[in-house]
Image (cartoon, grey):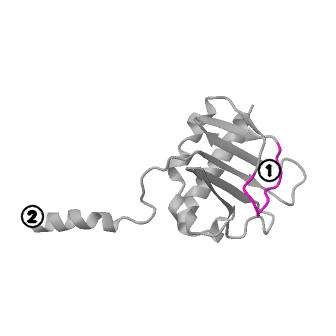
Amino acid sequence: MKKFLFLFAAALPLACGDDDQDAIDYDYVIFGDYYGECTTDCVHIYKLEANNTYSDATKMYPSRTAPYEGDYQLLDENIYDEMKDLLDIIPYGALKSHDTTIGEPDAGDWGGIYLAVSVNGEVDYWFIDKKEENLPDNLKPLLAKINEKLLYLSNHEN
């Protein structure tokens, strides 16, 4: 029995998937959605940084060639409390294994998700399909959480 417990304890770290990792200390996270075939209120981008939530005032359709540069305005301090659990669900390791574009974001007028993270000054960004069936299973919870946060922000933004 002792040998079994020893072998089990030794093998446990090997059984954990690549997405099982220590919490990431993000410099910031930028997330939001965008719609190309839209006439008004088409881009919603937010930034989480230093226990604050910011809303982008430029509302420009994100470029696929560089990280999004916004003009961020501080939102009510209580909003961050509703946003901070997003940081825990970002599958950073899994995202890093993907190209910048995941699925076919905004290809059929269903919009796309923009996500950027800065870790130790290094910025990675992705354009993620909003159509769930176009995503790998390990990214579907992230899509659901971002959509949940965007709905909350649309109802509570200053």
Q: Which of marks 2 and 1 is nearer the N terminus?
A: 2
**Magenta portion: prevailing SS class:** loop
Whole-Å distance between the Cαs marked 2 and 1?
58 Å
* Furthest-front residue in this view: 121
Range of magenta residues: 58-68
Q: Does the magenta stretch include residue 66?
A: yes
The residue type indicated by label 2 comes to Lys
Residue beneath the point at 60% across and 69% down = 98
Q: 48 or 36: nearer the eye?
A: 48
* Furthest-top residue in this view: 77
SS for callout 2: helix
Q: 124 or 137: nearer the eye?
A: 124
Q: Is residue 12 magenta?
A: no
The residue type indicated by label 1 comes to Val
Residue under numbered circle 2: 2
Circle on res. 43: 1
Image quadrant holding the C terminus, namely top right
Residue 40: % across, % down: 88, 48
For residue 66, side relative to residue 102 (left or right) = right
Residue beneath the point at 62% across and 57% down = 143
